Amino acid sequence: MTSLLQVDNLTIRFTRAEPVRNLSFEIGHSETLAIVGESGSGKSLTALALMQLLPSAAEIAAESRISFGGRELTGLAAREMRHLRGREIAMIFQEPMTSLNPVMTIGRQIAEVLMVHEKLSGRAARRRAIELLELVRIPAPDKRIDDYPHQLSGGMRQRVMIAIAVACKPKLLIADEPTTALDVTIQAQVLDLLDTLRRELRMAVILITHDLGVVAQWADNVVVMYAGRKVEQALPGDLFDDPLHPYTRGLLSASPRLKRDFHYRDGPLTEIPGSIVSAVGEAGCPFRPRCNQARASCGHHVPPLIVPAEDRLVACPFTTSSKAVPHAASLRF
Amino acid sequence: MSIADAVNIRDRAAERQAAAAQEAAATGAAADGPAWSNMKAPDARSQQSATVAITNGRRALTVFLTNPNALFGAGFLAFVILVALAAPILYPEDPLSMVARPFLWPGQDPAYPLGTDGLGRDVLAGILHGARISLFVGLFATVLGLTFGVLVGATAGYFGGWVDDVLVRLIEIFQTLPSFVLLVVLVAIAQPSATTVTLAIAIISWPTVARLTRAEFRAIREKDFVVAARSLGYGHGRIIFHEILPNALPPIIVTSSVMVATAILMESALSFMGLGDPNVVSWGSMIGTGRELVRTAWYLTALPGLAIVFTVLALNLIGDGLNDALNPRFSQDR
Amino acid sequence: MPLLSVSDLKTHYKSRDGLLRAVDGVDLVVERGETVGLVGESGCGKSTLGKTVLRLVEPTAGRIAFKGEDITTRDQKSLRSVRKSIQMIFQDPYASLNPRQTIGEILEAPLIVHKAGDRARRQQVISGIVAKVGLPADSINRYPHEFSGGQRQRIGIARALLLSPELVVCDEPVSALDLSIQAQILNLLVEMKKEFGLSYLFISHDLSVVRYFADRVLVMYLGRIVESADNATLWSDPRHPYTRALMDAVPDPARPRQAAPLGGDLPSPSDIPTGCRFHTRCPLATDLCRTHEPEFRTVAPGHQVACHLASHIH
Amino acid sequence: MAALLRTVRTLRRTLLHAIPTLLGIIVLNFFLLQLAPGDAADVMAGEAGSATTESVAALRSRFGLDNPVLVQLGDYLNNLAHFSLGFSPRYGMPVAELIGQRLPGTLTLMVSALAIAILLGIVLGALMAAFAGRIPDRLLSIVSLLFYSIPSFWIGLMLIVLFSVKLGWLPSGGAGTIGSRLTGLPALLDTARYMVLPATSLALFYVAIYARLTRASMLEVKNQDFVRTAYAKGLTPFRVTSRHILRNALIPITTMAGMHVGGMLGGAVVVETVYSWPGLGRLAFEAVMARDFTVLLGILLLSSLLVIAANAAVDLLHAWVDPRIGAR
């Protein structure tokens, strides 16, 4: 399968920090890739970098490569990039409250993208906007189309955002924490909708989230980020059955959700001590200050990604699978 | 004629925010995050209404001291203060007395570097002495207006309910009356003197502070740390002065420098119209007498005017500098 | 005698959209040493309920009794003695600490207000609690912004525990924290409960956290409790369709994905549906549900449900 | 349709809201009048030159000035209800009529000044925002701060020195060429020539306010999530600014424009004195000189009415521009 998007060695630089470092991943057509990490892991900046919408203080390092459908996006002229944005790569954001223009009707906000990219007339764009509202399952779309965002609930607003994003049938949809601001019953609706649209429109989805449960159910492939680096990549089944990186393991055992019948009377949850702040400025493995298996050598250099099994990557040399003995790992160390 | 108008937007914004926060608290929808972050309309001075900035004094001071504009403002203001203090020593005689031939142009006679007016009074002596009344009125009107405004605003914002309703009405009445017209009426009725002018300026300037303080208090009152204070059984006094006021202070401090500037402008306009203290020379009254001769001896108008412009500019530069130092979010844009 | 008992509590607000019935007739009991979990979606009134129990928001009707003593109409002054015994931990560790006070000042104020000993004694109490919640000893001279989210929540917990309360209302104490920090805070809360014999009213939107943390669970929907059961029962035998939907909606790696369990949006608390307030979203709703509000009935010992169909659901 | 409904609803609310404020202002006005030294009888007696205590007392009872304060307040309110603001002995005509004569002049001046201020201010502010942090922004920031610090009466005099005395391009005062009997366009141009300097003097301060406000407002809106959405749609920066940023950024500016009417009235008082512009401000100045408090308070009352009306107008505009208003 040829990949739709290939990111190589992405490094995002601010004057004093590099919140994303040497990140590589790829995603195939109609695939869902989840990028998981807690706040400060650099996952949202990665998404903005793909859209070339980073804040002006940030820059993408020269050696970074982002190839989309065979085209190199780094260094692409602003004009060219605008033709891709909203048409071939679309994005939805975490806060449906603030992501829509408050003084413009939702109909016009949807129509705008069609008028710009598909050169539709106002009337045609409005007709398509109604269809799109129907597509994202907003009841009575011909009435709702003249509503302002504040007249809609949070879930409805996120549906409108999705309608805008899929209006031009993009090949790639980047969803940055699309359900974090929503209630759990609404979250299920929105994720359901996203997945249906992915299949119907054959688009790839990058799902950025901090929620491991969401990852397990909706992703084809998972990238785990910590302090700006990819620390593990696997198919979701493998990841949850047999997490390899100490951070992933820590997360899974710290999460009450993944320990169904565990109650506080049975004992404490497994903790990951400290916080992500401790990773700042560390040479060596970023997770070392919080890792319960850290050794002296972890502080020397950043552990490279190794291939412990088919379709898996992990950035820890001391990992031991509880299942099959990884042959690739033993080759290197 | 009120610079302090500019401050009004920020408190309108903060009011709206407070209302939104209350609503969010009421619906229990706080978990949805701030409703419409763009509800906080910005204003010319600050966008940072009641977000409770994390600033410590030393950091703010560093920012202020590395801002060349603010330093210039502070330096010039210090110079004006020095001049005002030194005026009676440098020119012990009454600046309203005739000392030389009238209509000496600046530079014409080294004894009178800025020349003399139509009655042979020394312009430089007038300007130096004029600094005294400007600063006196500016400072005391601000202190009075600030004290009263903060008290009223804090009371209204903290207690809410009918107290708030009544006080807001009062503020609204004063803000609806065109402030300079009211000022003219007050001074005309009370008879002009340094004291009445100061009092009258305080009367027209407190509503701005009150409104700002009220908005800050309303917004901060809803913050969790104040709720925590209430849940711990703190008294009203402790909550107002220990918990809320320190957080409401930065915008109030910024406003106060603008208030001094406004008060100086107001005083000069009053004196210009002949409503200043008749026994004291002031920059405004110098312009007022100079204006009859503006066609021939325009320097009599220009020079005291420049004194006003630079003093007010210095205060406004300080205000901007304080704003940048105390409200860090805005400073990033500069 | 229960530690806290609340009966028919109502908290209504006037808002732009009319009367907002945030809490609309709630009965609840917290026994000594018990952790009661209160789950619901945003806008269901759970936070308001928590604040009303502490009299931080004034109730419209009903009765709040602490250790049998009615505190519903006590004035704030005479409430002060009760305040020592009921404390609160907040959701947002950034907003709940005064940014202009050092941790020492934040922690000393409650002791001053409640006249807990002289200065030396206060310092002793503070350093004790700081150590207990796992903060470094030099924390007391630092400001809140110098701490991470998890550490701040520890400060919030320290403040709540200073006055040796008996009941602590936790309002979403871990929702603002990253997963890796959540476990630290939950464990700390459990430790503190054991050490001080605390009772918790634990408010959360996160079912899995409540499942780990609560002894008994109340499910709230639009201002009312719709189901109440002990932890194990609720998870093995949920009776209210809303409870079931909430459980099904949580994405769980251990089970295959299924269709979204509920359609539609939460109605506004200022426009509560007639009959059963859940009928607009309920997959099982009948005509009876649309017209008659179900009673809160006991279906098994210690298990109550407000649903006409509760006995049919298993 | 929705916009219309919003506007009507806002109008009703605004008017209801204004009533108590208006009453408060009237009462305040009345008490100020009571505080004023001397009363109409004193003034008339003074004007007449020969006044005995008896004749003054007679005048007092004729005008009801010897009644208890509350009765007088009743009379005052009654008069107001009949649109009577009292009589000015000095001008020999009713105050209301006097003000009516002068009002159009002031309104013209204020509207022109406001228009200049808003247009120029928004342009400058947008420029500053576009170059935020760079040289043009810094320079314009200083310039606007300077505008902010200049007293309007002084800049008025300086403009006269430059444009009338030195250059001779524009008239130094008055509202039109006396006895020119112009009509139509030439008359308009003639008035415009007389208005350039006063309107500019009055506007400069507000140019500064709007420039700073627009700058801050645009920078704020630029950082909003929905602007990021607009860029993510692939819109050009121009389209993002014109369709998404500007309208949102202008909302606070509409709010401010209404609040400035009161301030501008005050500014007009001073500027009109400088330019002998026949408006309310000059009338106020003359009333001060003559200590004619009836006229002065009439002006205060009327200008407050003007502010209330302006605020109502702005609320309406606001409701029309911002769809969220109606929801409240």
Image (spheres, coloured by chain):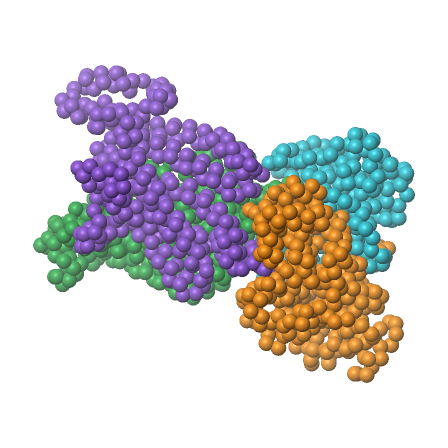
As displayed, is residue B187 above or below residue C158? above
As displayed, is residue D30 above or below residue A174? above
Rendering quarter of residue A38: bottom right
Q: Residue at x 59, y 74 (%)?
A: A61
As displayed, is residue B87 above or below residue D181? below
The quadrant of the picture occupied by the N terminus of chain C is top right
**Residue B157 is at least partly visible in this image:** yes
Rendering quarter of residue A39: bottom right
Residue D27, percent across and down?
Answer: 38, 27
As displayed, is residue C25 above or below residue A113? above
Nearest the eye: B60 or A5: A5
Q: Residue at x 39, y 48 (%)?
A: D118
Rendering quarter of residue C65: top right
In the rendered image, what is the letter of the chain coloured green? B
Q: Colour of chain D?
A: purple
Residue B42, percent across and down?
Answer: 49, 51
Residue B113, percent across and down?
Answer: 17, 61
Q: Colour of chain A?
A: orange
Q: Is residue D241 left or right of residue C255?
A: left
Nearest the eye: C285 or C191: C285
Q: Residue at x 64, y 47 (%)?
A: A127
The quadrant of the picture occupied by the C terminus of chain C is top right
Q: Residue at x 32, y 23 (%)?
A: D84
Nearest the eye: A293 or B238: A293
Q: Is residue C16 left or right of residue B317?
A: right
Q: Colour of chain C?
A: cyan
